[in-house]
Image (cartoon, rainbow, N blue to C red):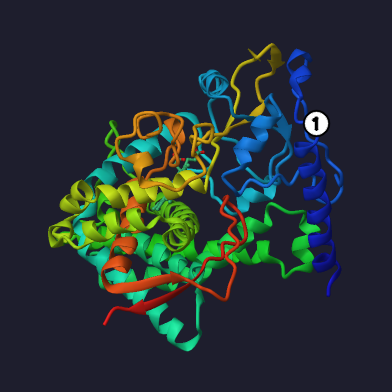
Amino acid sequence: MTLSQFLAPATLGLTAAATVWYLLTDSDRSNIKTSKHFPSLPLPFPYIFQSNLVEVSSSEWPLRLHQLNSPTFVRLPGFPSPVLMVIDPQLVKQLLSKCSTRPLIGDPSFTNLFGNTSIFRVVGSEHRRLRALCGRAFAKAALGFHFERLKSLAIQSLNAMAEACEAARAIDSMAFVQAYSYKAVCVFLVGDDSDQLEALELLEVDFIAFSTGFLAEFRPRWIDYFSGNRIPKAVAARSRIIKKCTEMAATRREQMNGGQLFTDSLSAFIESKDTDGNGFTDLEIAELFLDLLFAGFETTSKQLATVMYHLTHSITDSDMNLLMDEVANPALFESETTFSSKGVHLEAFIKESMRMFPVLPAPTRILVEDIVLDGVHLPAGTIVDAVREQGLFIPNAQKFSLSNFIGHDAFDKNQSTDFVPFGMGEGMCLAFLLAKLEMKLIVAEALRFFVVHKSSSHKSPIFTHFPSKTVNCFITVERKQ
Ligand code: HEM
């Protein structure tokens, strides 16, 4: 065992214990509100982690933060200064009206992983320009064109799970949903050209290296040094991805100049123009591919692991019957339009899964001006995390139920800013329609053609907050006869 392998879990355990102790003891902290400062969680081992390891992966996390009766400063890995966690919906609203850009997480070397024109790095008018160009491109590359391909991809992935289950008694769904999510974004980006699709799919291994390096950014450098230099490997993977994607954009541009017609996102990116008539450069498209594939497969696969978890562990028999009846209707699968409009229970199932375990439970923003929040002065530049309350304070909130998203006025967060698993405002998810379609399709095809159960021989721990390390949902998958 290396030093880092020993120290990391030991420190994690001790820090988590101290944080949990702070959260669980003396829960009546009502005196906090009268103080001039918001409280900070204790930091037991500043030299090693420089963070409070709050358990941000479960749906009870906002509830525990709420017990503090006050916004609270928490040190999170990768952030240069303490982050103010705010959960009260009124205070969240007040804060977000005074916030602008997202902070670039990680220390300065983080910039090696996202280039100068990455949507995660640019701010202000440049960010708005990129978003507007993407918006136009996505509107053109309608999901309807990819529906049949995504449907086959879902079945292919479920078949792979069933085959793996024949060899081993149960599988951890993570690796499979990760491959599915990655390939689904590839289809969305270059689905019209089978050579380009194959080339992009081959980059998955580089994306995994990139993603592993990104996670490593959230820990001190010495840990990375002792555990395989994942950050330099990610930087090298990034160069290969950018080179290949720039080539693909250039090739496609030539094909389009030669009169060939395409309907996928790459062609839409190439055609998209801003109000001055300027479009994306090939390098900008490559950066965008990196952003979209990274954001797309990391988030969707973690969320899908939770979806698989709820499908096999939490759903009630009556809700399962509603889903089974819905997917038994062949009209549902006629087109992307029928799938969206008729898949009411599927939609509710995905939303309820996201409510219980949101992958990104809080948008992180920077205050652009000084404000007084709940009697406390906060200077411009403060980093804040506006935690969504996810309906936790409503009776039966811990119960997984489709009815929460089918016409239940008191609980349905559909129209409200309280339930915004894809973010809101200037940084809202660019591809939430694709993400929802992917998740609904794999659930629908699993119910139609497969028998999916939880594994009786494994426990399924679940850690979903991005960028977390592990999501294990052990299941068995069998093809229906
Ligand atoms: C279940 C899956 C997904 C979830 C839960 C999710 C969630 C989010 C959230 C909450 C944000 C906003 C972050 C913030 O406000 O700071 C975001 C941004 C973003 N997402 Fe997603 N996302 C998912 C899937 C995808 C997919 C499939 C793609 C691409 C194909 C994608 C691309 C992006 C991009 C590019 C941004 C940044 C937008 C910007 O900076 O303007 N996401 N996502």
Q: Amino acid at mark 1?
A: Asp
Question: What residue sits 34% from the left and 53% below the top?
Answer: 319
Q: Is residue 99 above or below residue 441?
A: above
Q: Is residue 231 above or below residue 21?
A: below
Question: What residue sits 28% from the left and 31% below the top?
Answer: 275
As drawn, the residue found furthest toward the front would be 318
Residue 338, position in %: x, y? Answer: 16, 52
- Secondary structure under badge 1? loop
Quadrant of residue 50 in the image? top right
Q: Is residue 47 above or below residue 411?
A: below
155 left or right, relative to 461? left
Residue 25, position in %: x, y? Answer: 80, 36
Task: Name the foreground residue: 195 vs 393.
Answer: 393
Report whether residue 195 is seen.
Answer: no
2 left or right, relative to 445? right
For disc 1, does the CB lie below 8 Å from ligand 1? no
What is the quadrant of the N terminus in the image? bottom right
Task: Name the foreground residue: 139 vs 177.
Answer: 177
Residue 364, position in %: x, y? Answer: 58, 35
Disc 1: which residue = 26
Question: What residue sits 46% from the left and 56% below the top?
Answer: 314
Question: What residue sits 60% from the left and 43% below the top?
Answer: 60
Q: Is residue 394 above or below residue 371?
A: below
Report whether residue 31 is seen.
Answer: yes
425 left or right, relative to 72? left
Residue 32, position in %: x, y? Answer: 77, 20
- Sort mark 1 into few (<14), some (14-19) or many (20+) by Cα contacts within 10 Å: few
